[in-house]
Image (cartoon, grey):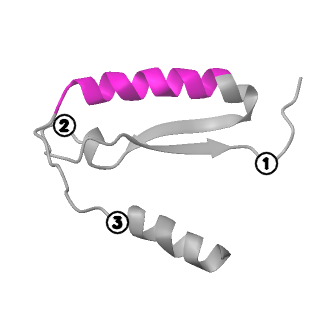
Amino acid sequence: SLHIGFLWRLKRMVTKHIIILPYDEHWKQDFLKIKAELTNALGQLTIGIEHVGSTSVRDLSAKPIIDIDVVISLSSPTK
């Protein structure tokens, strides 16, 4: 059933091990590459793309996951 399938997927999403690494300069470069791809894909809809979370803080140990906030316009872009 749908309910059992949902619970099975939910159980799979539970993290059993968390990895924390020392700050890595590559995190900033990884973000910049992703930002460029998002900017290219979203075009004029993009208002802002920011690197957030622990990987954005220099010298802070963090989970090696790049967190990004993307702000887009709800109105149509002007030409």
Between 3 and 15, the one lying in front of the other is 3
In the rendered image, the vertical position of residue 33 relative to residue 8, given as above or below: above
Residue range of the region highlighted in magenta in the rendering: 24-40
Name the residue at 46% across, 39% down: 50
Which residue is disc 2 drawn over? Answer: 58
For marks 3 and 2 on the same chain, the one whose residue lies earlier in the sequence: 3
Residues packed near mark 2 inside 10 Å, few (<14), some (14 to 19) or many (20 plus): few
- Percent from the top left, x then y, of residue 78? 87, 29
- Res 51 → quadrant: top left
In the rendered image, the vertical position of residue 62 relative to residue 13, given as above or below: above
The image quadrant where one finds the N terminus is: bottom right
Q: Secondary structure at mark 1?
A: loop
- Check if mark 3's residue and mark 1's residue have beta carbons within 8 Å: no
Tell me how far mark 2 sits from mark 1, CA to CA.
Answer: 33 Å
In the rendered image, the vertical position of residue 3 relative to residue 43, given as above or below: below
Query: Residue 26 magenta-drawn?
Result: yes
Q: Which mark is residue 57?
A: none
Question: Callout 1, which amino acid?
Answer: Leu
Q: Secondary structure at mark 2?
A: loop
Which residue is disc 1 drawn over? Answer: 74
Name the residue at 66% across, 74% down: 2
Closest to the camera, between mark 3 and mark 1, is 3
Question: Callout 3, which amino acid?
Answer: Val
Name the residue at 23% across, 42% down: 57
- Res 65 → quadrant: top left
For marks 3 and 1 on the same chain, the one whose residue lies earlier in the sequence: 3
Query: Residue 62 magenta-drawn?
Result: no
Residues packed near mark 1 inside 10 Å, few (<14), some (14 to 19) or many (20 plus): few
Please give the count of numbered marks on the rendered protein: 3
The image quadrant where one finds the C terminus is: top right
- Percent from the top left, x then y, of residue 8? 48, 70
Q: Which mark is residue 14?
A: 3
